Image (tube, grey):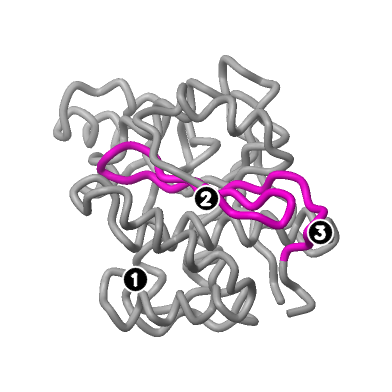
């Protein structure tokens, strides 16, 4: 357990989008808590009070030219099949203002040469909300960073991707076992969080994703040198936001 979060750490938060809004897990002073927020405005105080918050949502968007971000391509290469399919191409910033999926695809194709997946369009509202938050509140940029749960799980497992789909029972057991190995004190919190909200608002895999991000953030706070960025020298978008993913390789 030498890599587990320390009792004296500051607030480390993991956030994942879900049907009910945003689910979050926090490790602070050796204890776990969390909840469900309807929007990012509700989450702002939690993010601002954290030392590091990792969110599973794109930060930094292409505007024109490139068909995707280098971090997405690199994450797929590390994960391999079948986990690589969980890393999708985010929309260009202009596509976030589209009024429907067909319109968004046309805008994205014009700027990047590619259409959007339905999965991407379904979370476009959350991508837009996060993009606007970081555009208007620059004080959050140093503490709110992008991460991907599958990449983080890969790193926490020593560079081995998860074998099973996170929505299946075997995949959830696999991720719980990883978390139990790293910090078993989080599991009762995850169970309580799942019991407090209906599955139509937040699924079990959403909670596990948020916890994996929070454990990763806590490890970074314990040892800043443990933090890795993908790519190591990330590009910045038109707003100066880094197009990167944070993880820890154990």
Assign the magenta stretch its main secondary structure: strand
Say whether residue 30 is magenta. Answer: yes
Which residue occupies 19% across, 21% down? 99
Secondary structure, mark 1, is loop
First reached walking from the N terminus: tag 3 or tag 1? 1
The residue that label 3 is drawn on is: 222
**Across the whole image, how many numbered discs are drawn on residues?**
3
Say whether residue 243 is magenta. Answer: no
Secondary structure, mark 3, is helix
Secondary structure, mark 2, is strand
Q: Residues within 10 Å of mark 2 (few under 14, many from 20)?
A: many
Residue 196, given in percent of the width and then of the height, sits at: 32, 49
Task: Give the side of residue 103 with respect to residue 74, left or right.
Answer: left
Q: Quadrant of residue 166?
A: bottom left
Residue 24, given in percent of the width and then of the height, sits at: 48, 45
Q: Nearer the viewer, residue 150 or 89?
A: 150
Q: Nearer the viewer, mark 1 or mark 2?
A: 2
Residue 200, given in percent of the width and then of the height, sits at: 18, 49
Q: Nearer the viewer, mark 3 or mark 1?
A: 3
Relative to 7, is 80 above or below?
A: below
Relative to 25, is 138 above or below?
A: above
Which residue occupies 51% across, 59% down? 211
Question: In the rendered structure, which segment of residues is drawn in magenta?
Answer: 5-33
Relative to 164, is 236 above or below?
A: above
Task: Give the side of residue 114 with respect to residue 247, left or right.
Answer: left
The residue that label 2 is drawn on is: 25
The residue that label 1 is drawn on is: 166
């Amino acid at each position: 357990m030498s890599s587990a979060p320390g009792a004296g750490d500051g607030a480390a938060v993991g956030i994942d989008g879900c049907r009910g809004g945003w689910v979050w897990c926090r490790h602070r002073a050796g204890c776990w808590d969390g909840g469900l927020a309807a929007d990012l405005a509700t989450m702002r105080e939690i993010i601002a009070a954290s030392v590091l918050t990792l969110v599973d949502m794109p930060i930094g968007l292409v505007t024109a030219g490139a068909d995707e971000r280098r971090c997405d391509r690199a994450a797929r290469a590390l994960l391999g099949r079948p986990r690589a399919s969980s890393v999708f191409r985010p929309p260009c910033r202009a596509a976030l203002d589209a009024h429907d999926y067909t319109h968004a695809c046309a805008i994205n194709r014009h700027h990047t040469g590619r259409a959007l997946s339905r999965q991407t369009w379904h979370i476009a509202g959350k991508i837009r909300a996060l993009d606007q938050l970081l555009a208007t509140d620059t004080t959050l940029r140093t503490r709110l960073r992008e991460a991907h749960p599958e990449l983080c799980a890969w790193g926490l497992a020593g560079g081995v991707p998860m074998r099973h789909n996170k929505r299946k029972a075997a995949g959830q057991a696999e991720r719980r076992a990883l978390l139990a190995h790293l910090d078993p004190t989080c599991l009762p919190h995850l169970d309580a969080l799942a019991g407090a909200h209906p599955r139509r608002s937040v699924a079990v895999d959403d909670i596990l994703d948020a916890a994996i991000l929070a454990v990763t953030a806590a490890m970074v706070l314990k040892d800043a040198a443990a933090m890795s960025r993908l790519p190591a020298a990330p590009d910045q978008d038109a707003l100066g936001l880094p197009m990167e993913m944070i993880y820890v390789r154990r």
